[in-house]
Image: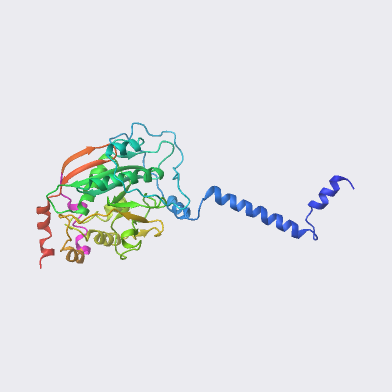
Amino acid sequence: MDDSQVYSKEARCGFTSWPHCLQVTFASLLVLCIFCIYVLYPSNSFLNFQDDFKQITLSSSPSLSVSLSSSTPINSKEICRPTSLRYDGKLNVKFSSPEFSQLEALYPEVNNGGSFYPQDCIPPDDVAVIIPYRDRDLHLRTFLLNIHSFLMRQKLHYQIFVVEQVANQTFNRGKLMNVGYVEAQRLFNWSCLVFHDVDLLPENDLNPYWCVDTPRHLSAAVDKFQYKLPYQTIFGGVSALTASQFEVINGFSNNFWGWGGEDDDMYSRVLLGRFSVHRHPGKYARYKMIKHQQESMNNANACRFNLLKFTNILWRRSGLSNLNYRLLNISVNRLYTKMTVDLYEEQSRREIRRFCAG
């Protein structure tokens, strides 16, 4: 018997050699599966990220403006994929507050006005990050230190907008975000809006900051609340809506002066607009809150519970539809665009006096 006959006999899977062939086949399939998992999906936690990615709808390419760099990719054909993700997505949140000059040196890729556009692919969304703000310089620096690297890894086209209310008025978070939306849209047709408190820092890369077909409550697990949802109807902290969703629900209410109420009202608006609220699993939607004292001009809103009783009546009357303000200044800084506004508190309070009586 020659060598070829010996080889063919041993290689053939007959009745007597089937256990050996079964072992070989099983081992081959196992190796193939491991290879596919390693190459395509580094961890099971990425699957949720991938599901969100499938819902992306491309918008028009950005034109040159104050919010963009002087050059954007022309020949890019592929949608960007998030890069530099850890397998579990966990981040090392930084609580330091570097000087602005130091921050600017850390992020040379960021363009004037706090905008970024990936140069090697088509970004999954055009995102305006809108921050209601007043007199929190240290918090803003800490926020910028963390958020720019976070958003760049997600390969988004984004810009940071800080909307500051004048000092002699009661803080109105909802109205500030309405102003931020209107003014940001004057600069560019943003398809996605992320409304973001300056004291919340994301802990996980697998918490996507682009928009899908359902309004998203991003900050579902905050350390202050032991990473649990305080109550089901909250929609505060960090949220993401498409521009069309935000228009349908008439934006935020303009009526909540002082702390509290506008986030619960927003949850009701989402439902009244015939949307549902999407929340990412708590292990991804994690945030650390920067500790701070209550501001003197942001005390609890004593009228908030009365106003919440009338959300189903007021949601079409108060919001983008009756927004009044005066833009005092707009400054284009290296890492963010800042708008300073007068919200006409006295005039606006007169409109809701009957709801707050008693």
Q: Quadrant of residue 260?
A: bottom left
**Residue furthest bottom in the image:** 358
**Residue furthest top in the image:** 70
The location of residue 23, given as percent across then percent down, is: 71, 57
Residue 251 falls within the magenta-colored stretch: no
| Quarter that holds the C terminus | bottom left
In the rendered picture of this protein, how many numbered marks are placed on residues?
A: 0
Q: Quadrant of residue 256?
A: bottom left
Q: In the image, which residues are magenta?
A: 311-326
Q: Residue at x 44, y 34 (%)?
A: 75
Q: Residue at x 62, y 51 (%)?
A: 32
Residue 317 falls within the magenta-colored stretch: yes
The location of residue 21, given as percent across then percent down, is: 74, 56
The location of residue 281, given as percent across then percent down, is: 40, 59
Front residue of 288/253: it is 288
Q: Is residue 83 left or right of residue 148?
A: right
Q: Is residue 42 left or right of residue 277?
A: right
Front residue of 268/249: it is 268
Q: Is residue 88 left or right of residue 341?
A: right
